[in-house]
Image (tube, grey):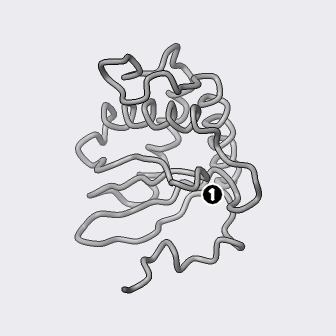
Amino acid sequence: MEKIASFQKDHDKLMPGFYLSGTANGVSTFDLRFKKPNQGDFIAQPALHSIEHIMATVLRNGGHKNDIVYFGPMGCRTGFYLLTVNMDEKTVRNTLKEALAAALDFDSVPGAEKAECGNYLEHDLNGAKKECAKYLRLLEGQDD
């Protein structure tokens, strides 16, 4: 089998940041790298789960909700994938920063009730906010 694109990247050189991974069939995949791979500093599973719930909710309710295909975690717990259509890289980046800022205002994790979530006991709102704030600062620092 062919090696998929994400496995062809040298993860020893990959740094935290915002990357366009590729575009196929009109869908752009963005790598939202919160952590440097293979350094032992991973997003804790409960925070990762909460970020997924919060960011998916914010993005799918925002001004570009019809252009958001998917937001979800990387299995390695170093970040997330954001899949979009009809959005250029600058618009995606700005939309992401707005969503991260909005995430910091949440008082609870959306969709975290037993009837709504397959692992409702594993959430960490404060951990999610901490990770989102750190990533937002990183993105803002890259804008300079």
- Quadrant location of the C terminus? bottom right
Give percent across and percent down for residue 100.
53, 35
| Vertical comparison of 13 with 91: above or below | below
| Vertical comparison of 121 with 139: above or below | above
36 and 94: which is toward the camera:
36
Return the residue at label 1.
17
22 and 46: which is toward the camera:
46
Give percent across and percent down for residue 125.
57, 23
| Residue occupying the point 56% across, 58% down | 18
Quadrant of res 39: bottom right
Total label count?
A: 1
* Crowd rating for badge 1 (residues with CA inside 10 Å; few <14, some 14–19, many 20+): some
101 and 106: which is toward the camera:
106
Q: Residue furthest top?
A: 107
Amino acid at circle 1? Gly
Q: Residue furthest bottom?
A: 2
87 and 114: which is toward the camera:
114
Quadrant of res 54: top left
| Residue occupying the point 43% across, 23% down | 120
Give percent across and percent down for residue 27.
29, 63
Quadrant of res 114: top left
**Residue 52 located left or right of residue 45:** left
**Residue 11 located left or right of residue 106:** right
